[in-house]
Amino acid sequence: MEKVIASDGNDSSRAIKVLAMASLVAFAILEFYFFKINYNPAGYAGAALLIFFGLWRIDNEKDLYQKVRIIVILSTFVLFW
């Protein structure tokens, strides 16, 4: 007899957090690759605040649709920044 393990949704929540963290890392790599660190520090502050706010929203959002929506917005920002 096979046992069925019930999933409580933590797998999808963890995947969303991993995707958001990957977006943050990709953004940091692209920023440091294309610009010198002392080029314009004020420009980094605004982008960093937006990303950290997005990660906070992803962590606190209960609705899966909203989490995915925020991840798409944050990833698009990181990709086209």
Image (tube, grey):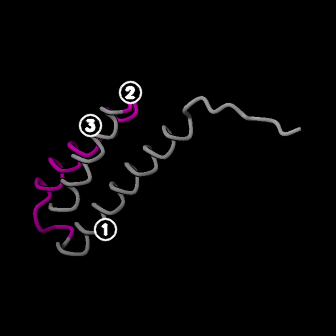
Between 7 and 51, the residue placed more toward the observer is 7
Instruction: Determine whether, in the image, residue 48 is placed left or right of residue 81.
Output: right
Inspect the image, locate mark 2, and give the three-letter code of the amino acid beneath it: Asn
Q: Is residue 71 magenta?
A: no
Image quarter where the C terminus lies is: bottom left
Residue under label 3: 53
Mark 2 or mark 1, which is nearer to you? 2
Magenta stretch in the rendered image: 37-64
Observer-nearest of 80 and 56: 80
Helix, strand or loop at mark 3: helix
Q: Give the labeled residue for mark 1.
A: 29
Residue lying at 36% horizontally and 26% vertically, measured from the top left = 63
Q: Nearer the viewer, mark 3 or mark 2?
A: 2
Q: Residue 3 shows which numbered tag?
A: none
**Nearer to the camera, 66 or 25:** 66
Relative vertical location of residue 28 with respect to residue 36 in this rendering, above or below: above
Q: How many numbered dots are placed on residues in this image?
A: 3
